[in-house]
Amino acid sequence: MQVAVIGAGSWGTTVAALAAAHSPTTLWARRPELAESMAATRENGDYLPGFALPDDLSFTADLEQAVAEAEVLVMGVPSHGFRQVLREAAPFVRSGIPVLSLTKGIEQGTLTRMTQIVIEELDAAPHRVGVLTGPNLAGEVVAGQPTATVIAVEDEWEGNRLQQLFMGPTFRVYTNPDVVGCESAGALKNVMAVAAGMAHGLGYGDNSMATLITRGLAELTRLGMTMGGNPMTFAGLAGMGDLVATCISPKSRNRTVGAALGAGRSLAEITGEMNMVAEGVKTTEAVLALAAAAEVEMPIAAMVGAVLYEGRKPQDIVAGLMGRPAKAELHGF
């Protein structure tokens, strides 16, 4: 199968390298100079310096060239640019091919998931549109450290085929038909990762972090279920697995933003120094809007929103979070 991966950030590049081990793969970069550099050096110096890319991986900044012959399309573009890039690629995408999203975010304004955007822009068959998600920090994956991921697609045959495409000696792939649950978990956990970073920046220890992760899982599960997700999905790789990785790892962009906020730095200063997108910064607003529409209580997400958008200080709202009325642990389920 000819594979096209759209988006040459750290994770898009990593997934392209995984696919290239099995099938001819082309990686599209928005900037021509990055595509040229990767072709010349066999390395993504901007996002994955020091890691050699497979000889069978091709590079281009031309969308038509990237997707025209593709039999599998993988979208690794940040949520704020996802629709526009896909719209530009749409005239060249072959009808009926499977499409996987790597993007863990919600579109601002429309509150739309990335797979829904794919279906809208490509008029794609919903059962062949899915996500690849899980506890997958790019640097560890390309370094060959063992991990697992989940491919969620409704069509069982398609899921099995895609599973074999990305499976590797140190990259174990599971399948799950619950696209909504896997995709929503991946987006919602970024908000909790910002909160976890704040806790770290404030100097809190392991008890605080374990509590935040566990209660964060409860929040994203409650909202994910209202969106149509299977509750069991949130206990798996897309939910708990990804949540733990992104909340505890200093390599997590969302945790990094939160830690800097907890240490007293401004959001503008933090994001101005980053060359990659922390999806949680934009996704929090959409998550809070979804929660309000579904009448789902998400106090941790609300705390993150207050810090990101209202200028509140993390240390000033912890007491309010802890002093909320007592409830049963399974309240809201």
Image (cartoon, rainbow, N blue to C red):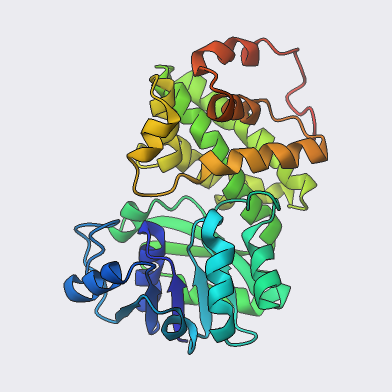
Residue at 32% x, 52% y: name it.
140
Q: Quadrant of the C terminus?
A: top right
Residue 320 sits in quarter: top right
Of 256 and 146, which appears nearest the observer? 256
- Compared with residue 69, is residue 182 higher up or lower down, i.e. above or below? above
Q: Which of the 4 image quarters holds residue 172? A: bottom left
Residue 154 screen position, x and y as percent: 70, 70
Residue 299 in picture, x, y percent from top left: 67, 25
Q: Where is 81 relative to 56, above or below?
A: above
Q: Position of residue 198 (x, y in %)?
A: 46, 25
Q: Is residue 271 left or right of residue 35?
A: right
Q: Which residue is depicted at the point 58% across and 14% down?
A: 317
- Tell me how many marks there are: 0
Outermost residue to the bottom: 69
Q: Is residue 31 above or below residue 270?
A: below
Left-right relation of 279 to 108: left
Residue 34 visible in the shown view: yes
Whether residue 103 is visible to the viewer of this picture, yes or no, is no
Give the residue drawn at x 71%, y 78%: 125
- Tell me where residue 59 sits by quadrant: bottom left
Residue at x 37% of width, y 65% of height: 8
Whole-percent x and y of residue 13? 36, 65
Left or right? Give the position of 118 relative to 7.
right
